[in-house]
Image: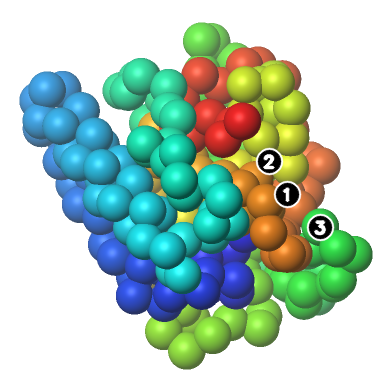
Amino acid sequence: MLRHFSLKNPVLAICLVFLASACHEAANGPTATYRKQILSERAVKDSLFAIAGKSPMPATELKDFHGLHYYDVDPQLRFEGPIIPVENAPIDTILGSKGDKRPAQKFGYFKFDYQGKFYQLAVYRMLSRKPGFEDYLFLGFFDGNSGESTYGGGRYIDLTLNPQNHYTVDFNLAYNPYCAYGGDYSCAVPPLENKLDFALNAGEKSWH
């Protein structure tokens, strides 16, 4: 799920994006403070997900809902750097899980070094953005845990357009699309080029 495309509650979307930004800032401080901020963001998300009628989960799931499942916080899986732009990128599409096509344009690539190997992830701008999300950038990915301990349809990280071209990709903030919880949703499918060849033990795990 792209938060700005399929969230039932826009207030929930704005709240979660704000908290993610706060976590980015706190990560520059001591590790203990960073971890506390991440755990705080997770607690707020859990409390919002527990609200019947606003949660993406079916009502039958909420009876036994005691919070989402996460990996431990790992500061080594937080990366900073520029997005290398793709000039004159053609109009493309991001497929939804129901086969719907969402107009998008490749914005660029975020590159990072993990355990001595370089990786890159494609970042997109969605062209059918809702008001208030004009600066939203979509980064969806798969990794070695997809379909095992994490949702098989991939996970997302929210980014916001930065005029200084400085971004934080924090995999501790990786989250599942709404399709991971059941219900009648169509969720953006990450591009196949964004499949990481290692098990990324960070962020949200599978619900079941």
Which residue is rendered at x = 48% and y = 34% of the image?
Answer: 204
Residue 186: x and y, percent? 74, 64
Front position in the image: 111 or 127: 127
How many numbered tags mark residues here?
3
**What residue sits right under mark 3 in the picture?**
97
Q: Are marks 2 and 1 in contact (CB under 8 Å)?
A: yes
Classify 10 Å Cα crowding around label 3: few (below 14), some (14-19), many (20 and above): some
Q: Is residue 149 left or right of residue 31?
A: right
Examine the rendered structure and indicate whether residue 145 appears above or below residue 47.
above
Q: Quadrant of residue 110?
A: top right
Q: CA–CA distance between discs 2 and 1?
A: 6 Å
Secondary structure under tag 1 reads loop
Q: Is residue 74 visible?
A: yes
- Looking at the image, which residue sits at the far right? 99
Which residue is rendered at x = 37% and y = 53% of the image?
Answer: 50
Earlier sequence position, callout 3 versus callout 2: 3
Secondary structure under tag 2 reads loop
- Looking at the image, which residue sits at the far top? 115
Q: Are marks 3 and 2 in contact (CB under 8 Å)?
A: no
Which residue is rendered at x = 53% and y = 29% of the image?
Answer: 205
Q: Disc 1 marks which amino acid?
A: Pro
**What residue sits right under mark 2 in the picture?**
154
Earlier sequence position, callout 2 versus callout 1: 2
Which numbered disc, 2 or 1, marks the residue closer to the eye? 2
- What is the image's colouring? rainbow
Q: Disc 2 marks which amino acid?
A: Gly
Q: Is residue 69 left or right of residue 97?
A: left
Disc number at residue 190? Answer: 1
Front position in the image: 194 or 206: 206
Q: Are marks 3 and 1 in contact (CB under 8 Å)?
A: no
Give the quadrant of the C terminus: top right
Q: Quadrant of residue 199?
A: top right
